[in-house]
Image (spheres, rainbow, N blue to C red):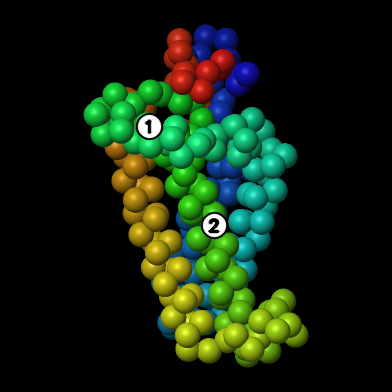
Amino acid sequence: MPAQDAGSSTVKVWDPLVRVFHWSLVFFFLLAYISGDDWEKTHVVAGYAVSLLIGVRLLWGLVGTRYARFTTFVKSRSVTLAYLKSMLALKAPHYLGHNPLAAAMVVALLLNITLLALTGMILIAGEGNGPLAQTFFASWSGDSMEDVHEFFANFTLLLVILHVSGVLLSSLLEGENLVKAMVTGRKRARSHWEDGKP
């Protein structure tokens, strides 16, 4: 049960690790994206930072606080599709943590960024650098792998745009500033939440 301060109309939802992870990932992904062609050292350092962040978030998704854990917010495909239909009808139920569509986006982003980081490591392995340099992955490096890496970078950017659009739409539908919630860690207290028992 999230903590509600006495006299407060908000409850704590996002713990500090989730919030620091979120905004750090935004920063380092964008840094890696814009430095890709011109500043290789910056690109590689930013890529490693992204890899480390993803690893920490995957671990925290297993053992972290209630609303950070995947078992709390990842829903079935049928629940997610039902939520999408209700959202399009402007009748989406409110969730204290991630709604099912946001949860699907979290999973998609984590998976895609993991593949992005892996293909990046394979590329530098072909140059004799990185943790995969002395493995068979080094032989996979080449123009085709560079194309795959660029695909994942561009697809991640598309997912980010969809994610931001979804956050803005959900903020309007729920009457709550979800960007602010990811900064403060707090969401409005309600008498009923779909993922219940606040």
Location of residue 78 (image quadrant):
top left
Location of residue 174 (image quadrant):
top left
Q: Give the residue at the far front of this rendering.
A: 78
Quick one: label 1, few (<14), some, or many (20+) residues within 10 Å? Answer: some
User: 191 or 21, which is in the foreground?
Assistant: 191
Give the residue type that dot 1 points to. Answer: Tyr
Asked whether residue 32 appears in the rendered view, the answer is: yes
Q: Give the x, y percent position of residue 43.
A: 52, 75
- Residue at image mark 2: 111
User: 76 or 48, which is in the foreground?
Assistant: 76
**Disc number at residue 139?**
none
Looking at the figure, which quarter contains the N terminus? top right
User: Where 135 sits versus 185, above or below?
Assistant: below
Give the residue type that dot 2 points to. Answer: Leu
User: 172 or 16, which is in the foreground?
Assistant: 172
Q: Which is more N-terminal, label 2 or label 1?
A: 1
Q: Give the residue at the far right of this rendering.
A: 134
Residue at 38%, 48% in the rendered image: 163
Quick one: label 2, few (<14), some, or many (20+) residues within 10 Å? Answer: few
Query: The residue tagged with tag 2: helix, strand or loop?
Result: helix
Query: The residue tagged with tag 1: helix, strand or loop?
Result: helix
Asked whether residue 185 appears in the rendered view, the answer is: no
Residue at 70%, 48% in the rendered image: 59
Q: Give the residue at the far left of this rendering.
A: 89
Q: Give the x, y percent position of residue 20.
A: 58, 46
Q: Give the x, y percent position of residue 71.
A: 62, 35
Q: Give the x, y percent position of residue 179.
A: 41, 39
Residue at 66%, 56% in the rendered image: 55
**Disc number at residue 83?**
1
Looking at the figure, which quarter contains the C terminus? top right
